[in-house]
Image (cartoon, helix red, strand yellow):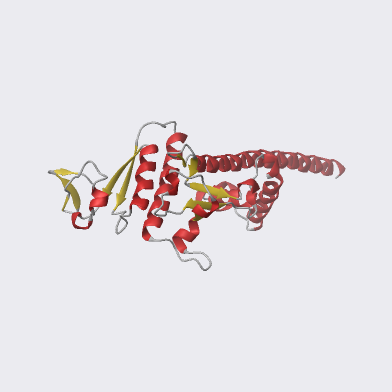
């Protein structure tokens, strides 16, 4: 009995060492992954600085509260240690076979979204976006707080403020799309080649110069080629003059056809 007890204590001790080693390995990797996501977020935002006519760097998007974000993995390791233990305990309590956990379930427990949330503990920064105006401040002025509003305010309204106009929403969302696509392009080591952005009737009633100027100038700066679909009768001159090429497309048998060729 004494011999058996000693062997069991030794086994549990070894298992504990293995478990602690596994936890440390996971939390180290998860912490580093979170820091990389934060660096990526900062990189995406900084790529949207527009050098205007006066030589000022004018950010089209900014992060408010960026100073609250962790800079080193040591700042968040203990939080992920706690979450690791909590997650493993929940799995064991539900008597789930660890070796048969589905990818979907694993993503719910330890996906990027969850890890990021646990590491930041609600210290999320706020995405601020340039609020278009007829003065087109981005072309000549230094950036000021009054030129910006939150992304949420533009898209949904915020507090007593209504949501942005159709033109403002179009510009802001186009900026965010280009920001993400530019980052993905750089991430795969493809910085210079142009990126095609296909939009379905994006402009609608938006034809004001202060709405269109930022979109086309930033698209040119970031090397984007815009391909836009729209019915010819609703395209205004202010928009059409910005496109050097027009194709007359037809829909045949559910497919888009140009000159006898199937495009899409």
Question: Which residue occupies the extreme bottom position in the image?
Answer: 160
Q: Is residue 177 left or right of residue 65?
A: left
Specify whether residue 99 is in view.
yes
Q: Quadrant of the N terminus?
A: top right
Q: Is residue 6 left or right of residue 34?
A: right
Specify whether residue 97 is in view.
no
The x and y percentages for residue 243 are 25, 44
Residue at 22% across, 57% down: 234
Count of numbered badges drawn on the protein? 0
Q: Nearer the viewer, residue 28 or 207?
A: 207
The x and y percentages for residue 110 are 58, 49
Q: Nearer the viewer, residue 262 or 57?
A: 57
Q: Is residue 157 left or right of residue 202?
A: right
Does residue 14 sit above or below 169 in this rendering?
above
Residue at 19% across, 54% down: 232
The x and y percentages for residue 43 are 52, 39
Question: Which residue occupies the extreme right position in the image?
Answer: 2
- Give residue 24's quadrant in the image: top right
Q: Nearer the viewer, residue 86 or 263?
A: 263
Q: Nearer the viewer, residue 241 or 190?
A: 241
Residue at 49% across, 66% down: 161
The x and y percentages for residue 57 are 49, 39
């Amino acid at each position: 009995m004494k011999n058996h007890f000693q062997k069991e204590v030794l086994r549990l001790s070894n298992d504990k060492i293995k478990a602690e080693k596994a936890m440390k390995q996971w939390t180290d990797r998860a912490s580093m992954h979170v820091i990389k996501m934060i660096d990526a977020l900062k990189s995406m935002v900084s790529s949207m600085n527009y050098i205007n006519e006066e030589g000022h760097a004018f950010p089209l998007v900014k992060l408010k509260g960026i100073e609250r974000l962790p800079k080193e993995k040591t700042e968040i390791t203990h939080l992920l240690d706690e979450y690791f233990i909590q997650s493993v305990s929940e799995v064991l309590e539900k008597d789930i076979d660890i070796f048969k956990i589905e990818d979907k379930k694993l993503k719910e427990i330890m996906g990027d979204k969850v890890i990021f949330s646990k590491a930041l503990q609600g210290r999320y920064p706020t995405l601020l976006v340039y609020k278009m105006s007829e003065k087109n401040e981005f072309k000549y002025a230094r950036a000021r707080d009054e030129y910006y509003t939150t992304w949420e305010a533009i898209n949904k309204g915020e507090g007593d403020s209504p949501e942005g106009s159709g033109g403002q929403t179009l510009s802001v969302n186009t900026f965010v799309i280009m920001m993400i696509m530019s980052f993905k392009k750089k991430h795969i080591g493809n910085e210079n080649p142009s990126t095609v952005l296909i939009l379905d009737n994006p402009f609608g009633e938006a034809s004001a110069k202060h709405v269109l100027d930022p979109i086309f100038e930033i698209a040119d700066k970031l090397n984007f080629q815009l391909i836009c679909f729209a019915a010819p009768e609703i395209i205004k001159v202010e928009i059409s003059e910005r496109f050097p090429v027009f194709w007359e497309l037809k829909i045949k048998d559910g497919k888009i056809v140009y000159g006898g060729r199937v495009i899409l």
